[in-house]
Image (cartoon, rainbow, N blue to C red):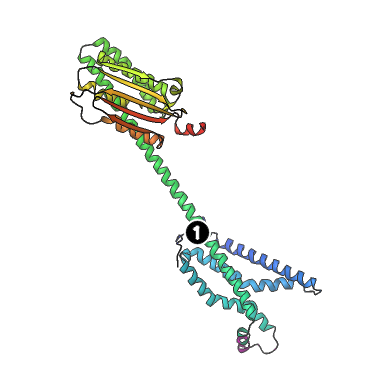
Amino acid sequence: MNTTHLSNSTPTSIDAPLLKVVGVNLLIWLGISTLGSAGRYHDILRHGGYLPYLGLWLTGVNALTMLFFISTGLYIFLQKNPEKIATTGHVIRLYVLLVLTFFPLHVLYSTIVPTWLNTPGPHTLDSLWSEFIHNNSFTWFIEFCWFTGTFTAVIAIRIWYIGQARNATLQQTQTAYLQLELALEQQRLQSLKQQLEPHFIFNALNAISALVRTNEKSVALVGIQKLSDLLSYALRASNRDWGSFKDELDFIRDYLALQQLRYGGRLEVSIHGDVPAILHGDCLPLLLQPLIENALRHDLDCHKGKSKIDVLLSLNQDQSQITIQINNQIQSKAKKNPGLGLGLSQTRLRLELMYEGKASMHIKEGAQDFSVVITIPSYRPDQADDML
């Protein structure tokens, strides 16, 4: 037989207090008795007879008294011991036990004893036993149906309560898990920002120091001013999760202007596709700078010749996605810098965290060029849904 496992414990907030269980059961059985007595009273009047309604009602209450005690006791017992209905086998064993013990007591109290007391003659144990074994089989069947229905109703209610408790516990667990996931993601994102800012500052200061070492003091002073502007943007960006493409591209132009003070005519830059529809889109602050820095690190830092960086921006047909492609040349004979640096790995992780799988990043490396292609939604996820 297949078994359905239920929770072995139920939160106290789900379980009803003892007095409430007794009160609700009492109201239910009094209601059943009242309705049943009203039906019998109506039938008697319709056939021309008469019996006091109060007497019929009291008789009905007495007939259902044992069912009240059985349902109340069973409910309280299962409330304290939910493991007793943990499987189908447990339920069957409990039912058989109650049929062998409480069901005969119910029949004895509700039908046999009243009939025996109303029977003329001596009221002895022998006469009571005779009444018990010769009782109408249909009466036994009706009482068995009442008993089974009561048992089934109590079991169903307790299983429902246990299911509610399990759902409440599951929802609480899922909520706690999601809150923990959110806290961890926020912590990871903050860690990325904390890594990104020192990395950017370190490389920018290297550019200024290179100018100082070449005794280009006036150019170095211009570089320091530009660095001040860049740091101002970086500090503002560190306090927010989103910015505009316009701000990001303005920052990139200033950053490249600073780098051109260092590299001079060796560095050629072109930015295409910065149309209004893209400039008004949302962008992660400092998204492009690590990629530009990566291009410089693995190209111009590796040789003395010229090189070019191309930044290409484009929209898909429905303008829901922006593609960013950053290309830089590679000198095949130049000595390579080790590793890929922090820029690429950090950018990929930021995209995963902030766009929740709706962004992509691909790296293409050829014999003479290197490119990074990023595709992101035109607007950050929370605004993109509102615009549909």
Query: Label 1: how many residues lie within 10 Å, few (<14), some (14-19) or many (20+)?
Result: many
The x, y position of residue 11, in whole percent, is 48, 56
Residue 123 is one of the magenta-drawn residues: yes
Front residue of 187/136: it is 136
Query: Magenta region: which residues?
Result: 120-129
Q: Quadrant of residue 310?
A: top left
Q: How many marks?
A: 1
Establish if 94 lies above or below 262.
below
Front residue of 83/39: it is 39
Front residue of 33/361: it is 361
**Which residue does the image show at 59% across and 74% down from the upper left?**
144
**Which residue does the image show at 36% across and 19% down from the upper left?**
271
Identity of the residue furthest to the top in this view: 218
Give the amino acid type for the residue marked by disc 1 in the picture: Ile
Circle 1 is placed at which residue position? 162
Quarter holding the N terminus?
Answer: bottom left
The x, y position of residue 282, in whole percent, is 43, 27
Q: Quadrant of residue 289?
A: top left
Front residue of 44/271: it is 271
**Which residue does the image show at 63% across and 74% down from the upper left?**
142
Residue 293 is one of the magenta-drawn residues: no
The x, y position of residue 187, in whole percent, is 36, 37
**Which residue does the image show at 62% across and 80% down from the upper left?**
137
The x, y position of residue 295, in whole percent, is 27, 24
Tell me if 288 is positioned left or right of 69 in this view.
left
- Residue 234 seen in this snapshot: yes
Tell me if 362 is positioned left or right of 335 in this view.
right
Label 1 element class: helix
